[in-house]
Amino acid sequence: MTKYILKRVLRSLVTMFIIITILFSLLRLMPIEGYFESFDKMNEVQIQVKLNSLGLTDPLPKQLVRFYKQILSGDLGVSNVYRRDVSINTIIAEKIPISLELGLTALAIALALGLPLGILMARSTRTRFRIGDKLGTVFIVIIQAVPAAVYHILIQFAGSQTFLKLPMLFDPGDPKSYILPIFSLSIGNIAYYAMWLRRYMVDEANKDYIRLARAKGVPEGRISRSHVFRNAMVPLIQYIPNSILFTLMGSLYVESLYSVPGMGGLLVTAIKRQDNTLVQALVLIYAVVSILGLLFGDILMGLVDPRISFAKKEGGR
């Protein structure tokens, strides 16, 4: 296990290096207006002085080495347009608590509703009419087939314009304004967890050792809890850290739709205002979050199920 973890960490570091290098190089091809707050009002001399002060006139390899030293020290740079000369670390520190609050709540709701729905669907497949499985499948198909932007807008419209009369936009001082963003953040994960848990439980329930347990007269509830559900959760656990990290970082679209001043809305705003340095820092953060999610998922799966051997070649991903 230790050897496998070291290999995965090393592979993740190499992946991060490649991503950072590509990201940095591509952003250097962007228009230089993104490094200035009032580019149209500046003359050529002022532009060149600013570029020199930022080190953007140096050769690309030299800029890249300097950037690596900067991020290794924990410095993501300063914003040039969004909030001029303000540290990006400071900006992110102000945004993360809001995304954490919404994300943790949405994730708890998704797990609390998605897992029981998956269990209900899986158990319903063994009944005569399979009502629970059919209704759950309709819900999952709708969520998976309809673009997220469409049902997010429908949720906002239905929640704010119908008898519910919930606030359309987010207000930190109004608890009711949390309901629609949280529900919008959680509904996709509810369908995701239900779909995969149902699949894994159905696959597990058809295995020989489960049939043997039924033939021996083991109660169906005990089989479902102690064997089917427990073993079906192992592959699902692999994806939970990734969804947790991305949920905590905030949804790009949902936070923009409800004007939530979190991490998701920050990236959209930075792109719109062409703040190159801020975009670079945020894309880097999301890339690191993605890599860490995959790494933690693999490790967690091995810890939960000690039968999995990562020493073999087929154990890796």
Image: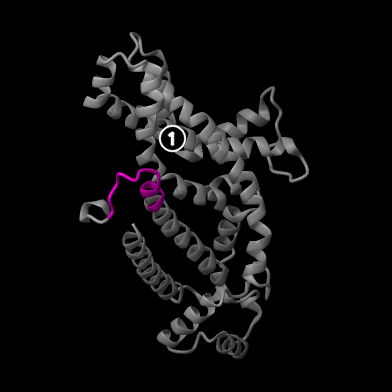
Q: Please check the rendered image and state whether residue 307 is part of the magenta-colored stretch, yes or no.
A: yes
* One can see residue 43 in this view: yes
Q: Is residue 80 above or below residue 309?
A: below
Taking depth in this image into account, of 226 and 90 the one nearest to the observer is: 226
Quarter holding residue 143: top left
Image spot of residue 157 (x, y percent): 61, 32
148 vs 269, left or right, is left
In the rendered view, does 89 fall on the left or right side of 111? right
| Mark 1 neighbour class, 10 Å CA radius: few under 14, some 14 to 19, many 20 or more | many
Residue segment shown in magenta:
299-310
Observer-nearest of 16 and 1: 1
Residue 81's spot in the image, x, y percent? 63, 70
Q: Which residue is mark 1?
A: 193
Q: Residue furthest top?
A: 128
Q: Is residue 18 within the magenta segment?
A: no
Q: Is residue 87 above or below residue 253?
A: below
